[in-house]
Image (spheres, rainbow, N blue to C red):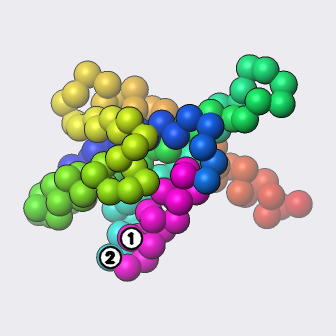
Amino acid sequence: MAQTYFIFNFGTSEEIAQQARHRLDSWRQAFHLTNKLEYKLDREAAKKEGAPDHLKLFVRLDFSDHEKLSHQRWVDRIPTEAPFKESSPKVVRQGDPDFAESAKVFDALFHGQRAADRAARER
């Protein structure tokens, strides 16, 4: 499997982060990428009371080995499109020194959300 992580830093711009999330949702639906393109929005609480949260969007592309061309097209496309290009995009590929840490953070965010969703359904 060819995996790549993107980390987009939106600072305190909730509106732009939501635009990015909507763009990803539309791509997932239009191009049938449900399991190949996953994302998680990380809200880091502000240190000062009343200050807006700091927002980072973690995106994982997960294509099979025979889909290398599609994978590369998305790697090239996502960071260059609005609203992603203005968010200091960081691309982390397999073999990069930050890959294991990026995967760990993404999985923690992803599984944490699933646990929260299950807890909400059980109420």
The span shown in magenta is 16-30
The residues tagged by marks 1 and 2 sit, at their Cα atoms, a distance apart of 6 Å
Kindly identify the amino acid type of the residue bearing the numbered disc 1.
Answer: Trp
Question: Is disc 1 surrounded by few (<14), some (14 to 19) or many (20+) residues within 10 Å?
Answer: few
**Does 115 lie within the magenta span?**
no
Q: Is residue 21 above or below residue 8?
A: below
Q: Observer-nearest residue: 12 or 91? A: 12
Question: Label 2 belongs to which residue?
Answer: 31
Q: Residue at x 43, y 77 (%)?
A: 29
- Please tell me in which quadrant of the rendered image residue 119 appears: bottom right
**Does 21 lie within the magenta span?**
yes
- Please tell me in which quadrant of the rendered image residue 34 appears: bottom left
Kindly identify the amino acid type of the residue bearing the numbered disc 2.
Answer: Phe
**Labelled pair 1, 2 in contact (Cβ < 8 Å):** yes
Residue 73 x/y as whole percent: 17, 60
Q: Which mark is residue 27?
A: 1
Q: Determine whether the residue tagged by mark 2 lies in a helix, strand or loop.
A: loop
Q: Determine whether the residue tagged by mark 1 lies in a helix, strand or loop.
A: helix
* Main secondary structure of the magenta stretch: helix
* Tag count: 2
In the shown orientation, is residue 6 left or right of residue 58?
Answer: left
